[in-house]
Image (cartoon, coloured by chain):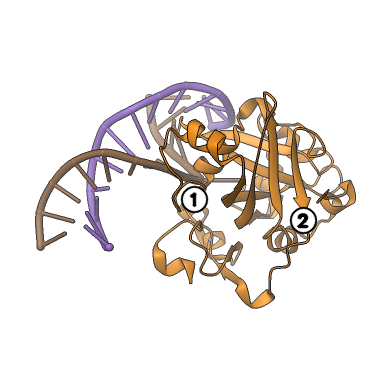
Chain colours: A orange, B purple, C brown
Amino acid sequence: MRKLPSSFYLTDNVVAAARDLLGKLLVTRVNGVVTSGRIVETEAYNGAADRASHSYNHRRTPRTEVQYAKGGKAYVYLCYGIHHLFNVTLAPEDQPLVVLVRAIEPVQGIAAMLARAGKPSPDSSLGRGPGNVTRILGIGVTHSGVSLQGDISICDDGFALPPEKIGVSPRIGVDYAGEDALLPYRFYVKGNASVSGPAKWRR
DNA sequence: CAGTGGATCGTCT
DNA sequence: GACGATCCACTGG
């Protein structure tokens, strides 16, 4: 069980990184409570060249500024006024590449996760969907910009995901991105019950 | 099941 | 002033 080294986040191959993050553990410590889950679904957002990205065409705003910093930080923002979405920033400075974590399989601190979700017992929907990921891990917009070597981290516990278990598809909910909505930038663990979307997308 | 619509607010134009 | 990188409850078949 070791944190991914800071060098992992300096790649500019955001698509490969999205795939490599599958099977890793996303760990948080919030108010002393440690919770973690295995990443089973991700999406790559390819910065300036990607119409689906907040930083398309090098757009810089206060919100997206953290994307332009050196990789290895959390990028968290509010979506639909309700959901906080967690992203991993990548690349050396000035390349706004990020990976959105869309689903986790709960591993550690299930009781705390249930309390945060307001659910009585675990089921396959607990860590399914990007809004639920942040909800059960206690991640909020206040975490945007924090290093992934601290209270939020991504760890390798030796779990090896067989390559044939990795599924690829277009991204979800980015219809506004035109042609870029069709790019095969979504990665998921085939057959995993925590993967979001219709059941057929889990195969 | 599939399809629909309401919730809810920071961010950018 | 409009709009989401969503979720869930509710409808109808």
Residue A157 is tagged as 2
Q: Position of residue A69 (x, y in %)?
A: 81, 37
Q: Position of residue A166 (x, y in %)?
A: 62, 71
Residue A188 image-quadrant placement: bottom right
Q: Position of residue A87 (x, y in %)?
A: 66, 44
Residue at image x 54%, y 37%?
A111
Determine whether B11 is above or below A190 in the image: above
Q: Which residue is mark 1?
A: A128
Residue at image x 60%, y 29%?
A140
- Circles 1 and 2 in contact, beta carbons < 8 Å: no
Numbered disc 2: secondary structure? loop
Q: Nearer the viewer, mark 1 or mark 2?
A: 2
Name the amino acid type tagged 1. Answer: Arg
Alpha carbon separation for disc pair 1 and 2: 21 Å
Q: Chain of mark 2?
A: A
Numbered disc 1: secondary structure? loop
Closer to the camera in the image, A53 or A185: A185
Whichever of labels 1 and 2 marks the residue nearer the N terminus, that label is 1
Q: Chain of mark 1?
A: A
Q: Residues within 10 Å of mark 1 (few under 14, many from 20)?
A: many
